[in-house]
Amino acid sequence: MPSKRGFKKRVKTQIYSLERRGHMLSPRRLFGTNGIRGVVNKELTSEMAIKIGSSVGTFFKHGTLIVGHDARTSSPMLTKAVIAGLNAVGCNILFVGMVPTPTLQYAIKNHKLDGGVIITASHNPPEYNGIKVIWNDGIELSRDQEIAIENIFFDEKMRYVKWNEIGTIRDLFGVVDDYVEAIKKHVNVERITKKHYRVVIDAANSVGNLATPYLLRDLGCKVITINGNIDGTFPGRLPEPRVENLTELASTVKAIDADLGVAYDGDADRSVFVDENGEIYWGDKTFALVEKYFLKDNPDEKIVTPVSSSTLVKDIADAYNGEIVWTKVGSVTVSQTMKKMKTKLGGEENGGIFYGPHQSVRDGAMATALVLNIMAKTNKKLSQLIGELPKYFIEKGKVECPENLKEKALEKLAEQMKGFNISTIDGVKVWFKDRSAILIRPSGTEPIYRLYAEAKNEQKAKQLVNKYSLKLEKLIDSVKG
């Protein structure tokens, strides 16, 4: 464990799309929506990890890279394999061990290094793992850069060095302390400290326990942690911070009369919040809250968000003189769009908040500090702050679909939905006249379709998920032949 350390304005809506396709098992594809992912020792083996490491190192032209990993049982094995591949092509490694993904991303930028690699499968179940490759600005690689690595990998163009040019490995200490101090620069520490907030953290038995508790204690909070022991089998709950996985967090917040609860995913770049009454909020709501107070201080700014986000996010932009930039789903797409357009704020419905003044990547600890900063500034509870936002009910679902049927099913779905108000920027999103909507899109990391529905009442949102799940299942069955 590391040491302590009011006028509603109609605004233009932009559509910005970066191409990110497929799954790691597709021909000449390694990278999916968010890094390379697969079931350990089946789709992602140590031999493959060595080759990926050598391909990544060749792409970086023998530079100096930071390498770290999450808490999964397979992470040490795959980390050693990736490092071996990187060393074999002459890369020098600064090893940071087990850290949250945003900590490693900040360290790359802070130490002005060539890039980095983190071994993590984020929210996926424990049998999965993955490899994320980071550029020198702390942001995951663009699609063009990914293609360059894929070409090296599949064409066997790794540039192995002589025996006396093999890269070195040394430990890099203090990255968590540096990361915590960097976050504190973006909030009013004194004002938060005076509130003495009680905060419950659900760390998902993973790296969410390695930085945020120390950050919050520096912010004067009383911190209570559940699922805080590191265990890559995730015995407390699955690493996806969905509502059904957070009942223990919600009940703990109520039982001890805490001010706030926050749950992280497996690599702590996403955060899902619980108010003082034990109410769990989808990421749209807390992102809209951060967006509201950001636009109050920064009017006329662009806000980057995927098409999967709620209409709530656009409502806030309209009300506070902002401009929405819609993208395809995926944190890398949001980050790369923010980088290209030089924007300061992005967010996802799944709990990812990208605060550009700190770093243009999703960051669970930074998001937590921003929410506490708003609570302290307004002297309001989270339930009050969320209650002031336009109300939408969000429901999610998923339908299993083999990788080879995803594209056929999507084409058939788009054909059936002609005549509706739809977008095909990423999957198929349908807007209805009663302000409800549903997005149906294939996952870039798992053999499933994801469904995101929203409506002005909970029943309608659930009905949309159920109706379109059945429709999608029938479509998938129809294209199997």
Image (spheres, grey):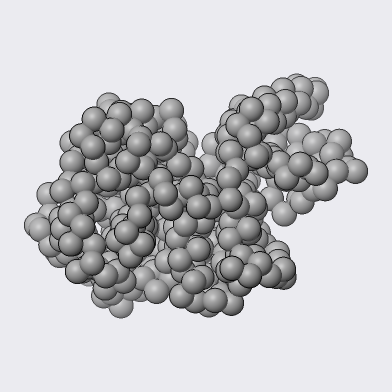
**Residue 393 in sight here:** yes
The residue depicted at 82 percent of the width and 48 percent of the height is 421
Q: Is residue 382 left or right of residue 424?
A: left
Compare residues 125 and 294 and report the one nearer the observer.
294
Q: Is residue 393 left or right of residue 434?
A: left
- Return the x and y of residue 95 as percentages of the image width and height: 21, 60
- Return the x and y of residue 438 as percentages of the image width and height: 69, 40
The residue depicted at 20 percent of the width and 40 percent of the height is 225
* Residue 416 quadrant: top right
The residue depicted at 18 percent of the width and 62 percent of the height is 193
- Return the x and y of residue 372 as percentages of the image width and height: 31, 57
- Return the x and y of residue 250 as percentages of the image width and height: 33, 33
Q: Is residue 442 left or right of residue 88?
A: right
Compare residues 371 and 468 and report the one nearer the observer.
371
Compare residues 102 and 30 and report the one nearer the observer.
102
In this view, the residue farthest toward the left is 3
In this view, the residue farthest toward the right is 419
Q: Is residue 416 left or right of residue 439?
A: right
The residue depicted at 47 percent of the width and 57 percent of the height is 289
**Residue 120 in sight here:** no
* Residue 401 quadrant: top right
How many tags in the picture? Answer: 0
Question: Which quarter of the rendering shows the C terminus?
Answer: top right
